[in-house]
Amino acid sequence: MNSISSDVIRGYNDTMILYLLLEKPSYGYEISKQIKQLTREKYIIKETTLYSAFTRMEKHGYIVSFSSDEEGSGKRRTYYRITEAGRQYYMAKRDEWQLTKEVIEHFILKEGSGNGNH
Amino acid sequence: MNSISSDVIRGYNDTMILYLLLEKPSYGYEISKQIKQLTREKYIIKETTLYSAFTRMEKHGYIVSFSSDEEGSGKRRTYYRITEAGRQYYMAKRDEWQLTKEVIEHFILKEGSGNGNH
DNA sequence: ATATTTACTACGTCAGTCGTAGTACGACAG
DNA sequence: CTGTCGTACTACGACTGACGTAGTAAATAT
């Protein structure tokens, strides 16, 4: 229970990935490391979750893939670039997040209260 | 897309219900109306979701059920009361929520920014 | 040479949500 | 006194996202 349960995150994995793709095209391993770094290891996305998010989002048209052909350096990777639809989806999710926060916080007792009055 | 997608909420429906049960024992229809009211209709829990949450949480020992026997007024209802385990679970979820918020907000662009610097 | 890191793919399972449907009782209107 | 509406559920099945396990294979470090 020290690390965050990913069930909570469900539905926001896509958002996290898209956020990172806003900056530049990227690929699985890099995204994974960035998420780990950004959250200071509080959240580590599972490989299967990550790659299935890629295929799902490509199917939905939020991202497109391309291979790292030229440049003999490193392994062949599958890069993903965010599309306009992906940007819009991200923005919608960002807005939705504000609402979600608001909603859930109606049900969160404030820290340190000794009694249950609300 | 005007009302919040409940997929986001997933994993917090239980928390919401438990929060309301902290105050007093209650039953499905009442809980449902309270959630609607509290969130000013921003979130309306589905009946099936609610009742399956009840049975799941009773199985986990977070709540216990009892019938409204006496008092001939109204229909027979199944009430639920939160247990000590339920209280602890709620508290754990409340703490987890702080973490979750922190994590997700690393991936949320601040409103009104014109460029994508982050 | 070999172990580790990188970079995936495949497959199957599980839990929570939700659509659809149906039951049944009580109150209230016409 | 009959039908409709609000209340209070139960049952069943479908779908989706997350994830455990496993395996492949090239590049890099030891």
Image: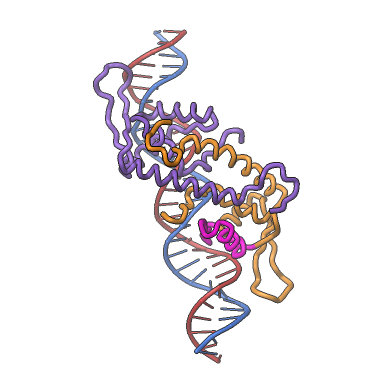
Chain colours: A purple, B orange, C blue, D red
Residue at position x 64%, y 42% from top?
B92
Q: Is residue B64 above or below residue A67?
A: below
Q: Is residue C29 above or below residue B64?
A: below
Q: Which residues are magenta?
A: B27-49
Q: Is residue B40 above or below residue A80?
A: below
- Assign the N terminus of chain B to one quadrant of the image: bottom left
Left or right: residue A58 compared with residue B76: left
Residue at position x 69%, y 45% from top?
B88
- Assign the C terminus of chain B to one quadrant of the image: top left
Residue at position x 65%, y 56% from top?
B20
Question: How many marks on residues?
Answer: 0
- Residue B65 position, x and y percent, is 68, 60
- Residue A65 position, x and y percent, is 29, 34
Q: Is residue D8 or residue B21 the one in the foreground? A: B21
Give the quadrant of residue D23. Answer: top left
- Asked whether the viewer can see residue B69, the reply is yes
- Residue A27 position, x and y percent, is 36, 29
Q: Main secondary structure of the magenta part?
A: helix
